[in-house]
Amino acid sequence: MLKLTKTTTFHLQATSTNYLRYKSWFADVKMAPPDAILGLTEAYLKDKNPKKVNLGVGAYRDGNAQHWVLPSVEEAEKRIFSKKMNKEYAPILGLAEFYNRSIELALGKDSEILQDKRNSTAQCLSGTGSLRIGAAFLGIFWKGERLVHLPTPTWPNHRPLFMHSGLKVASYSYYSNETFALNAQGLFDSLRKMPENSIVLLQACAHNPTGVDPNREQWCEISQIMKTRNLYPFFDLAYLGFASGDIDKDAEAIRIFASDGHQFCLAQSFAKNMGLYGERVGALTIVCSTKEEAERVTSNVKTIIRPMYSSPPIHGARIAKEILNDNELYCMWLEDLKTMANRTMNMRKQLTDTLIALGSKRSWEHITKQIGMFCFTGLKPEQVARLTKEFSIYMMKDGRIAVVALSTKNIAYVAEAIHAVTKE
């Protein structure tokens, strides 16, 4: 018979305590899959090839393949620093001088929505945060079909954004892999078959990842179908002014829907069009039926933001506010937009011309027909794998490239590599 002493009793107690201390609460948690884009960057950074090229990350680069701080942003920041402003918390909704000008930029100064004050607008954390707050609002208050339809393909972050907000996710036809263009008829048919009261995610311009947008007539058709079917539009506007260099042209889809009487959600980002990637500057607007309804919606948006991140950061919003509310800086920014858009379009043309000059027998005209930061090249996964293995050129497995990562220094090398893996 075991005789318990003070020493053995203490040892057993200590063992029991250690067991409890080291017991795993999360033993069943599995390793999450790595982010596809960030994973590419990690592999690129480890590559020792001096000719390596990263075509995965969507961040604008200048002609020397370097990050470009917009002159308008530099000047705005100088002015902010000269004012020696404090670092107090922003209000829950952010800086009104920023978000009011932001929605005006999208809808236009003469918008009836703004004149009637039917918009509930808030500063949010760039495009992702704006989408997330909008999705959270719909997840709580949406009384229709709790289903969000996303284009095929779409930005990978769209799906988890809505799912984490308690909404179900489905897909609709958008892109044709055969023509490298919009599958317009498939898109129209998909909309007509959706359950009424469904939510539809629409990228307003420079569709990510395809670079393929509907034209004006097609947007009008989409608007009418959605109105007839009682479908709710949720616009993602991440590239206003960056796509074409023209604010009004890039906002065309949203203004068509506004003029057709739609109520909708709109998520705006100033990451790309102001180069404020790390500042996280964006805005969410929920268009309502009346001013009173907008006020009620705003009060509830506040209750979502408050426990999520309390209030948005101020520095980037101050930069955007300075630019949008000063005529000199605003005009400077419009020129910056043209610079970025024109260089991006020029890179598309140079890549196409170089491939043709190399003797490629394939058609590459879709590269110049597409628009914005990204291009769906039509490259197959096995060809992408060869580009990475043999040439240290990194891109998404679906063949999407960030056109903005091309420069006069690497475009010949990239074209030669693409030609090498696509020869018949």
Image (tube, rainbow, N blue to C red):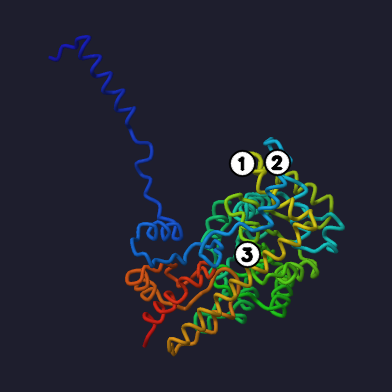
- Is residue 116 shown above or below 367? above
For label 1, the residue is 309
Mark 2: give few (<14), some (14-19) or many (20+) Cα within 10 Å.
some
The one of 255 and 233 positioned closer to us in this rendering: 255
Q: Amino acid at mark 1?
A: Tyr
CA–CA distance in space, label 2 to label 1: 9 Å
Residue 249 is left or right of residue 277, and the answer is right
Q: Which of the 4 image quadrants contains residue 196?
A: bottom right
The one of 312 and 227 positioned closer to us in this rendering: 312
Mark 1: give few (<14), some (14-19) or many (20+) Cα within 10 Å.
few
CA–CA distance in space, label 3 to label 1: 24 Å
For label 2, the residue is 92
Residue 99 is left or right of residue 420, and the answer is right
Q: Which mark is residue 201?
A: 3
Query: In which quadrant will I find the N terminus?
Result: top left
- Is residue 84 shown above or below 59? above
- Is residue 43 shown above or below 416? above
Image coordinates of residue 305 in percent, x first then y, are 66, 43
